[in-house]
Amino acid sequence: MSYHFIYDLTRLPGEFFKNITEMVSKQKLHEKQENVSENIVRESRVDKILGIRLEDAISVVEDLVDIQIKNLVYEEGFKKARKKVLLVSHCCRKYMDSRCKAEFNPEFSSYFCNHCLPDCLANRATVLGEEKGYKVFILPGGSCIHKILGNTNCDAVLGIACPDEIKLGIEFVESKGLPIKGILLTKNGCANTEFNLDSLKEALV
């Protein structure tokens, strides 16, 4: 879903995300979905910590759980893949103007990082991905996935984006019969967004 509010998950304790992962795995929610998001929100006081409405906090946690379920479903297929791509949302760039030296390639409707700023998250994601043999694309929008997969020989996809973009991406990649993993932005918005680098390192198998 497209959020009408801004969240900053970095306010939540680190163990919160670990607990969600363990809960999804132990309860096998990828085999049988259970309505647990509201309980998680209430028990962890997510709405109070993030300063958002209860129903908005539930939406965020529901998406976290849904994405983690998909990650578990495709875990084995993703590990076996040999030609993987990493898709990074362009809003992770430090600058969204001419100070960013990423080059736009119309063949893929995507940017390619030129490593101009060491503290730029898009740059750091690109470096980590390329070190693991991934081809890295910086996407202006989720619709670019169609062009990337159409012009790239890959057998798995790892994406970093906001919940609605990840869920749309999962739907499309699944339709192509490919395994996919998603990493949710910890801070959303259209600029200066953030994601957890440790989560990316763990996902880059």
Image (cartoon, grey):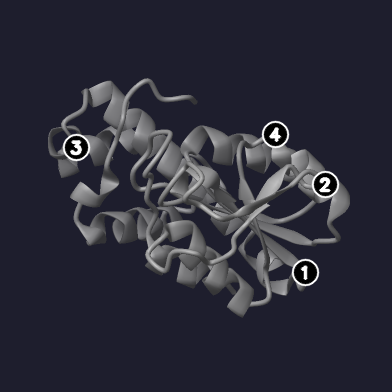
**Gap in angstroms between the C-alphas marked 3 and 4:** 30 Å
* Residue of label 1: 83
What secondary structure is marked by label 4?
Answer: loop
Tag 2: amino acid: Glu
Q: Is residue 135 above or below residue 171?
A: below
Q: Quadrant of residue 51?
A: top left
Other residues around mark 1 within 10 Å, as few (<14) / some (14–19) / many (≥20): some
SS assignment at label 1 = loop
Q: Is residue 40 left or right of residue 156?
A: left
Asked if residue 29 can be seen in this view, the reply is no
- Could you tell which of marks 1 and 3 lies nearer the N-terminus? 3
Q: Position of residue 157 (x, y in %)?
A: 68, 56
Q: Which residue is situated farthest in the bottom direction here?
A: 131
Q: Element type at marker 2?
A: loop
Count of picture labels: 4
* Mark 2 and mark 3: Cα distance apart in space: 40 Å
| Residue behind mark 4 | 143
Of the residues under marks 2 and 3, which one precedes in the sequence?
3
The percent position of residue 54, horizontal first and vertical second, equals 22, 25
Residue appearing at x 52%, y 49% in the figure = 69
Alpha-carbon span between mark 4 and mark 2: 13 Å
| Mark 2 and mark 1: Cα distance apart in space | 19 Å
* Label number found at residue 107: 2
Mark 3 highlights which residue? 50
Q: Earlier in the sequence, mark 2 or mark 1?
A: 1
Instruction: Give the residue at x 76% y 73%.
Output: 82
Q: Disc 3 vs disc 4: Cβ atoms closer than 8 Å?
A: no
- Residue in the picture at 56% in, 58% down: 72
